Amino acid sequence: TALKIPNTAKYLKKIQYLSIMILQGGFILKVNVFIDKNHEEEIQIFAHEKTALIEKIEELVNDFSIEIIAYNDKEIVRLNLSDIYCFITESNKLFAITEKEKLLVKSRLYSIEEKLSCDFIKINKSCIANIKKIDRFNASISGTLEVKLKNGYTEYVSRRSIKAVKERLGL
């Protein structure tokens, strides 16, 4: 039996293609993106060594591969980690705070913490905040540190967590 070869020109018309070069640390990183509905989604990285850029790409992929299932009244909502400003516990229930909503998550804070990327940091015993969503810190004379998120939500860093938060954020 003969091997049937598809019409390559016709196939290539169905694929969107992007190729860019990124200069990083004296090396050129070539990035090729193929958009093809008929191909399994995958990411491949070929590098001489692991760099900060590659770590950021891994982090980004992990953020989008982890979805949190949350509940809003009668709806079930799928959330990407990048949409979550923080996780809080109130009355023994876990909530995900997004830009405009507070959604119930049927899990425990410690089990969510294990799944999170390095963009999240525990700021007190009942809150884990997304570092990328922090707007500012306000320090008081009494030594407390208030965290204000970009959506306006406010939490306080516990005395126990202040050192770790400052180290993590380079303060």
Image (tube, helix red, strand yellow):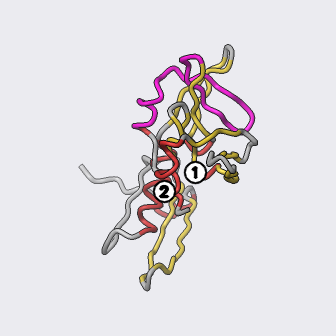
| Three-letter amino acid code of the residue under disc 2 | Arg
Question: Residue at the location (51% across, 51% down)?
Answer: 165
Closer to the camera, 85 or 18?
85
- Residue 85 at x, y = what percent? 63, 41
| Three-letter amino acid code of the residue under disc 1 | Ile
Where is residue 28, by image quadrant? bottom left
* Secondary structure under the numbered disc 1 in the rendered image: helix
Question: Residue at the location (64% across, 49% down)?
Answer: 133
- Point out the stretch of residues depicted in magenta: 91-114
- Residue 33 at x, y = what percent? 51, 62
Instruction: Give the residue number, with chain letter if any, for mark 1.
Output: 131
Where is residue 86, by image quadrant? top right
Q: Earlier in the sequence, mark 2 or mark 1?
A: 1
Residue sitting at the far bottom: 26
23 left or right of 145?
A: left
Residue sitting at the far left: 1
Closer to the camera, 134 or 75?
134
Distance between the alpha carbons at the discs numbered 2 and 1: 9 Å
* Secondary structure under the numbered disc 2 in the rendered image: helix
Instruction: Give the residue number, with chain letter if any, for mark 2.
Output: 168
Q: Are marks 2 and 1 in contact (CB under 8 Å)?
A: yes
Question: Residue at the location (56% across, 35% down)?
Answer: 127
Label 2 crowding class (10 Å Cα cut-off): few <14, some 14-19, many 20+? few
Question: Residue at the location (48% across, 56% down)?
Answer: 168
Quarter containing the C terminus: bottom right
Where is residue 29, by image quadrant? bottom left
